């Protein structure tokens, strides 16, 4: 029988570990003292966020800087005609959109959508990644539109009150898949922290379709099978596509 996988502990270190930041880190489930036997470190300073194993490994050391990284360039060039935005109908929409990113990861797509005016609840099951997403949203100034939650997306959606149901739900299960994306360092780190992807994403899609008022958007590799039958239409991007599912018939609206 395959041994069970245990999520690695992540400890906040660095000059940013005191005060309100430390309290927020504890709320997201980070440790206060490093585990000498293993685990990961999250080093937060005024000019960078670094995730690294306790045992040094340059291949698994990820440096993030929300103010001068490629993320800033992506945010500056975000347009409503981009494939991601068109999948949510933003190119035809004048009113603000409330959506849930149910597989947030580092929340880069979340912040792209927030940059275009969407209000987003971002859900990430790995506490350390949720905390980093929270920090990146704060550093980009998008925390006024992005709220990051650490937890299980199915439970969060099932507990969503009727008056807070989102217009749309976004699913990006791609970083949990094997393939060429695995060579990217951020994907490798995310997978190490998240562990093996044993969960079937179809139940999450089914719940999302009953909660979303309008649609569910699923990010897929070109050539990959749809996550489930029922795609209403797809929006192609350069290397990926977005499958759009309309809200399930009979869902409360």
Image (cartoon, rainbow, N blue to C red):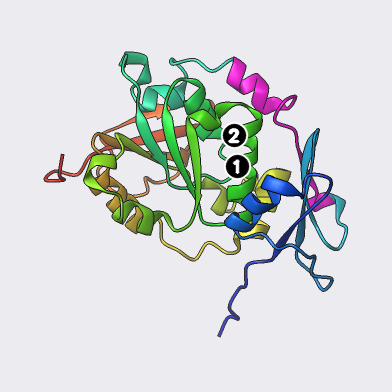
Q: Please, what secondary structure does the residue beneath circle 1 have?
A: helix
Query: Which residue appears farthest toward the bottom when viewing the image?
Result: 1
Magenta stretch: includes residue 72: yes
| Residue neighbourhood size for the residue with mark 2, other residues' Cα within 10 Å, grouped as few (<14), some (14–19), many (≥20) | many
Q: Which residue is mark 2?
A: 137
- Disc 2 is placed on an element classified as helix
List x then y, in percent, for residue 160.
30, 50
The C terminus: image quadrant: top left
Query: Does residue 96 appear left or right of residue 142 in this picture?
Result: left
Q: CA distance from mark 1 to mark 2?
A: 6 Å
In magenta stretch: residue 166:
no
Image side of residue 135 versus residue 68, left or right: left
Q: Which residue lies at the image location 37% right of the left edge and 35% below the top edge?
A: 99
- The magenta region covers 59-76
Q: Residue at the spot x=77%, y=50% of the render?
A: 17
Q: Which residue is mark 1?
A: 133
Q: Quadrant of residue 166?
A: top left
């Amino acid at each position: 029988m395959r041994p069970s996988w245990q999520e690695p502990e992540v400890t906040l270190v660095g000059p940013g570990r005191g005060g309100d930041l430390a309290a927020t880190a504890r709320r997201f489930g980070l440790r206060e003292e490093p585990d000498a036997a293993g685990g990961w470190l999250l080093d937060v300073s005024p000019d960078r966020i670094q995730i690294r194993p306790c045992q040094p490994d340059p291949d698994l050391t990820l440096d993030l800087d929300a103010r001068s990284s490629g993320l800033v360039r992506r945010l500056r060039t975000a347009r409503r005609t981009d494939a991601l935005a068109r999948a949510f109908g933003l190119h035809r929409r004048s009113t603000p959109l409330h959506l849930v990113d149910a597989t947030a990861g580092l929340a880069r797509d979340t912040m792209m959508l927030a940059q275009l005016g969407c209000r987003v609840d971002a859900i990430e099951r790995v506490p350390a990644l949720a905390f980093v997403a929270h920090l990146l949203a704060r550093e980009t100034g998008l925390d006024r539109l992005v709220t990051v939650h650490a937890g299980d997306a199915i439970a969060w959606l099932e507990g969503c009150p009727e008056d807070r149901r989102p217009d749309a739900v976004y699913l990006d299960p791609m970083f949990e898949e094997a393939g060429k994306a695995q060579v990217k360092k951020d994907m490798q780190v995310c997978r190490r922290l998240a562990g093996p992807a044993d969960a079937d994403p179809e139940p999450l899609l089914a719940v999302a379709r009953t909660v979303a008022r309008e649609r569910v958007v699923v990010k897929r590799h070109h050539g990959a099978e749809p996550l489930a039958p029922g795609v209403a239409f797809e929006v192609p991007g350069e290397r990926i596509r977005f499958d759009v599912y309309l809200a399930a018939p009979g869902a409360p609206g």
